[in-house]
Every structure is written in structure tokens, then in C-alpha cells.
């Protein structure tokens, strides 16, 4: 699984709180003290005594979330079938195409209940790559497969796609075979 690093948040410490909320079981204590101008000693004040002199303390944290790379045809419904993927790239490396072939995809089992196929979505910790170039294959009037194409028009698009595929391959035990 991959990890997602989101933007940190800032929150003032509440006057009623003795602990700052934390992630992954790590807690941090808020220290409330005021320096005495008479003796130079530090006084530890309780919450009720400290209320008039409340300071806003901003805490920044990195939130780490787990995201499994997935493919979806209906947003919110993960495709369980692992596809056969073929890649093409231009000689100059400026563009390329990925062709995904799904034999008997699970989306056909749930499409009537969940909704219609709206596109091809590749979701990972960096966001979503999407395409609307999706074609269904039918045999004897019954859905048998799906072919989806994702076009990469720049080297940056290619690099982003390859990062997704590396994560997806690791999560689904796939390997790259050069032909």
C-alpha cells in the first residue's frame, strides 16, 4: 500500500484541553506556564487560572493516510479484475498510450445496482488520472470485456502514469514484460 501525505493543519490549543490531538497514537502535551516578573521562577497554572492569558499556539502535523491504487469505471466502485496493460511510446518520448484490457470485469456485475460506467479512473495517492475512451466488448449479446485507453501527451503525463502503474503493479503483484 502507498501512503498519502496531505497538507498539515493548524489548530489553536483549547483552554480546556490538556492534550493536543494526534495521529498514529502519538500525543503531545501542551505546556502552560507564565514567567513571574518578581522572582524569575516559572509558574505552572491550571486551565482555569490560565484562561485570561490564553495564547494561541499553532501546531502543524503531517497527516499520513493509506491509499491503495485502484481502477474504477464507476466512481466509488473499485474494479476487482486485474487488466492486461499494453504501453506504446513515441520514438521521441513526447507522448504515448496505455491500453487496458479487462476480461469479464467485475463492473458488469454491479453496474445495474450502482450506476452506469462513466469513464476510466486510475486513483492513487497523487490523485486521479482519467479517460473517457472506454469500449465494452460483447459476445452473444452478453458483456465479455472492456478496453480502456489512456493517452499521455507530454513526458510529464508519461512519468505520472508510470508512477501510478508502479504502485498499482506492486499492490496487485504484476510485473513488467518488455516485448
Image: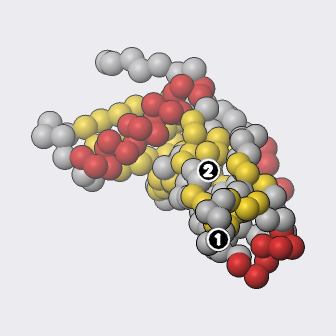
Going 71% across and 78% down the picture, which residue do you hit? 53
Of the 4 image quadrants, the one containing the N terminus is: top right
Q: Does residue 146 sit above or below 130 in this rendering? A: above
Question: Mark 2: few, some, or many residues within 10 Å (few <14, many ≥20)?
Answer: some
Question: Mark 1: few, some, or many residues within 10 Å (few <14, many ≥20)?
Answer: few
**Mark 1 residue element:** loop
Coordinates of residue 159 in the picture (x, y in percent): 32, 42
Of the numbered discs 1 and 2, the one sitting upstream in the chain is 1
**Mark 2 residue element:** loop
Residue furthest front as drawn: 39
Coordinates of residue 44 in the picture (x, y in percent): 76, 60
Coordinates of residue 85 in the picture (x, y in percent): 46, 32
- Residue 75 lies in quadrant: bottom right
Q: Does residue 8 sit above or below 67 in this rendering? A: below
Going 61% across and 45% down the picture, which residue do you hit? 64
Res. 16 visible in picture = yes
Position of residue 149 in the picture relative to residue 34 (left or right):
left
Coordinates of residue 123 in the picture (x, y in percent): 56, 48
Going 32% across and 18% down the picture, which residue do you hit? 179
Amino acid at each position: 500500500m502507498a501512503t498519502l501525505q496531505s497538507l498539515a493543519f493548524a489548530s489553536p490549543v483549547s483552554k480546556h484541553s490538556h492534550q493536543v490531538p494526534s495521529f498514529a497514537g502519538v500525543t503531545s502535551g501542551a505546556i502552560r506556564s507564565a514567567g513571574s516578573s518578581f522572582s524569575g521562577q516559572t509558574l505552572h497554572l491550571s486551565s482555569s487560572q490560565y484562561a485570561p492569558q490564553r495564547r494561541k499556539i499553532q501546531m502543524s502535523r503531517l497527516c499520513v493516510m493509506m491509499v491503495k491504487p485502484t481502477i474504477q469505471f464507476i466512481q466509488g466502485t473499485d474494479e476487482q479484475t486485474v487488466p492486461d496493460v499494453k504501453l506504446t511510446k513515441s520514438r521521441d518520448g513526447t507522448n504515448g498510450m496505455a491500453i487496458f484490457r479487462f476480461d469479464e470485469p467485475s463492473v458488469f456485475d454491479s453496474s445495474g445496482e450502482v450506476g452506469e460506467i462513466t469513464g476510466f479512473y486510475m486513483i492513487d495517492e497523487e490523485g486521479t488520472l482519467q479517460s473517457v475512451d472506454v469500449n465494452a466488448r460483447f459476445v452473444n449479446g452478453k458483456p465479455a470485456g472492456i478496453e480502456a485507453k489512456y493517452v499521455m501527451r507530454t513526458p510529464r503525463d508519461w512519468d505520472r502514469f508510470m508512477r501510478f502503474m508502479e504502485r498499482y503493479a506492486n499492490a496487485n503483484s504484476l510485473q513488467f514484460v518488455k516485448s
